Each structure stands twice: as C-alpha cells, then as structure tokens.
Amino acid sequence: EVQLQAFGGGLVQAGGSLRLSCAASGFTFDDYAIGWFRQAPGKEREGVSCISSTDGSTYYADSVKGRFATSSDNAKNTEYLQMNSLKPEDTAVYYCGTCRREVYGTDVVYEYDHWGQGTLVTVSS
C-alpha cells in the first residue's frame, strides 16, 4: 500500500527557512515520482514541485522557484523540501505525494495521485 506522510511544519518568521520531510512506504522512488503541493485556507490546491520520471528534472511553481528545493534520500525512502526566504503567502498545509506530468493541449498540469497527512506551515510577517 502506497503511504506518504509529510512532517516538519511549524511557525516561522518571514525570511526564515524550514525543511519538510516526506516519509514514504509501500513503494520506492523508482516506482513513482514524488512532489509537493500545498493548500491555503480558501484557496485552490497549488502544485509546488514534481520530479520528472523521464529525465529527473524537477518542476517548481513560479511562486517558489529559487526559494524552494527538493532532495531525496533513497536509502531512507524520504523526500525533503527545503524552503528558504519564506513569505506569509507561503502559509498553507503542505502535502507530499506521487506526481506525474500531464499535457492537455497546450497546458502542462502536474497531477498528484497518492498523498497522506499534510503538515502546516505558518509564516508570520
């Protein structure tokens, strides 16, 4: 059974950093690409990152590009999201999940198929 859980959230001041972890079980990173998405109160889900299963490149949303970075420890089946220069608008519940890149006409969309409990990140101004 595919299971993922994000943890490591908390309260941080604007400009600060936080590292989230994603513990995965029931599969290996060779089976699925892993990504992060977030959901803020009253807002739609936003894809934050997704590693391409074809060339290993990583997609980052424009809103986090240059500030967030993913890494993984395959031996521990753990994915990390390093978040730097945090802004109040980064406040959201963050989830890790299996992800895939889909193209619908001219639109590129990142879909998240499996995810578990998220972790709340609150950035104070």
Image (cartoon, helix red, strand yellow):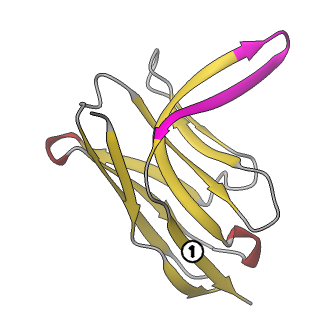
Taking the view exactly as shown, the residue that stands out farthest to the front is: 1
Tell me the quarter of the image containing the N terminus: top left
Task: State the predominant SS element of the stretch in magenta.
Answer: strand
| Residue 47 visible (yes or no) | yes
Can you name the residue that lies furthest to the left here? 75
Q: Position of residue 39 (x, y in %)?
A: 68, 58
Is residue 114 placed above or below 116 in the rendered structure?
above
- How many marks the image carries: the answer is 1
Residue 14 visible: no
Dot 1 alpha-carbon crowd within 10 angstroms: few under 14, some 14 to 19, many 20 or more = many
Q: Residue most toward the top?
A: 105
Residue at position x 17%, y 48% from top?
A: 76
| Residue closest to the eye, 5 or 35 | 5
Question: In the rendering, at what x and y percent does residue 46 appear?
Answer: 71, 48
Residue found at x 37% / y 55%: 5
Residue 82 forms part of the magenta stretch: no
Q: Residue tagged by mark 1? A: 121
